[in-house]
Amino acid sequence: MRKVRKAVFPVAGLGTRFLPATKAIPKEMLTVVDRPVIQYVVDEAREAGIEHFIFVTGRNKAVIEDHFDVQFELYDTLAQRGKDEVLSRLQSLQPAPGQTSFTRQQVPLGLGHAVWCARELVGDEPFALLLPDMIMQSQKSCMKGMVELYEETGNNIIAVQECDPAEAHKYGIVGRGEDTHTGFRITEMVEKPKKGTAPSNFYINGRYILQPEIFQILENQERGAGNEIQLTDGMLKLMNNQSFYGYHYRGRTFDCGSPEGFVEANVAFALWREGTARSMAGVIRTLLDEYDKA
């Protein structure tokens, strides 16, 4: 079985829901507490043993590349000022030379097209795909659990979570087959099913491990919903020849592609960290009291 060594991060989106903040700053560089959203996603991949990080970018995204580069002037200034703890923390987040690659998605043709743009960098091996808008909060990372399930099954893996069945029509939903140790076999995939027709309440949460055969399918994929090349359409075709398994993720997922999800993530991570939890809990209680009195 080939190891999952590479991860793809599609970061070419415009972030229109965050304008005017994203006029000059990519949405992936907006900070949750003290680090950019994209850093959380890369850290998740690193925890899962990923060795090569591939970013599919667009115009005005160069700051993402700069973020993962060595900043000699900053490092030197921190060293001279004796900020050894801060310097060590920054260096621990720094990918090693040759571990990052960047390619462009010149035209906005959807997620499937963004994945296809990474084909030459991924090559003929399985790869992880992490949507950067979605950040996770759990003791063991979502991708780490997915890699363990991949090593158990040797097949395509999609991370799923349970939602309120009444809300299933808002998501991409999978059908549930026989169980494995940490997941189950996927029997079908439906994008935003009509109310009352969903095969389950397990929704796709933005994490995948895919076999390289998906690239050939996406290369010839006709445009689907939104006149874009849809990844789900490609996976459905791949499902005709290969098995898919769902990894049942039981942590929290925050959609930082929406202002509400972004604020929720900031609050949740501030309360999750030992250094900020107590003070933030007090601030939130005070704000809620003032809101109730208003």
Image (cartoon, rainbow, N blue to C red):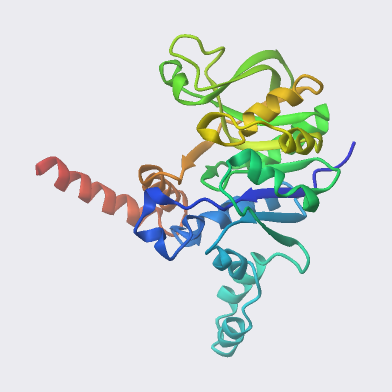
Which residue is most to the bottom?
A: 80
The residue lying toward the viewer, choosing from 226 and 248, is 226
Q: Is residue 255 visible?
A: yes
Which residue shows up at 54% across the image and 34% down it?
A: 227
Q: Position of residue 231 (x, y in %)?
A: 64, 34
Image quadrant holding the C terminus, namely top left
Which residue is most to the left?
A: 294
Q: Is residue 267 left or right of residue 153?
A: left
Which residue shows up at 73% across the image and 34% down it?
A: 220
- Tally of marks: 0
Examine the image and state in which quarter residue 61 appears: bottom right
Q: Is residue 266 visible?
A: no
Examine the image and state in which quarter residue 129 appears: top right
Q: Is residue 52 left or right of residue 284?
A: right
Q: Position of residue 32 (x, y in %)?
A: 45, 55
Which residue shows up at 75% across the image and 30% down it?
A: 156
Which residue shows up at 84% across the image and 43% down it?
A: 125
Which residue is most to the top?
A: 196
Q: Position of residue 81 (x, y in %)?
A: 54, 88
The residue lying toward the viewer, choosing from 287 and 105, is 105
- On screen, residue 51 above or below 256: below
Examine the image and state in which quarter residue 111 appears: top right
Q: Is residue 128 left or right of residue 256?
A: right
Image quadrant holding the N terminus, namely top right
Q: Position of residue 56 (x, y in %)?
A: 64, 53
- On screen, residue 175 above or below 251: above
- On screen, residue 195 above or below 113: above
The residue lying toward the viewer, choosing from 93 and 86, is 93
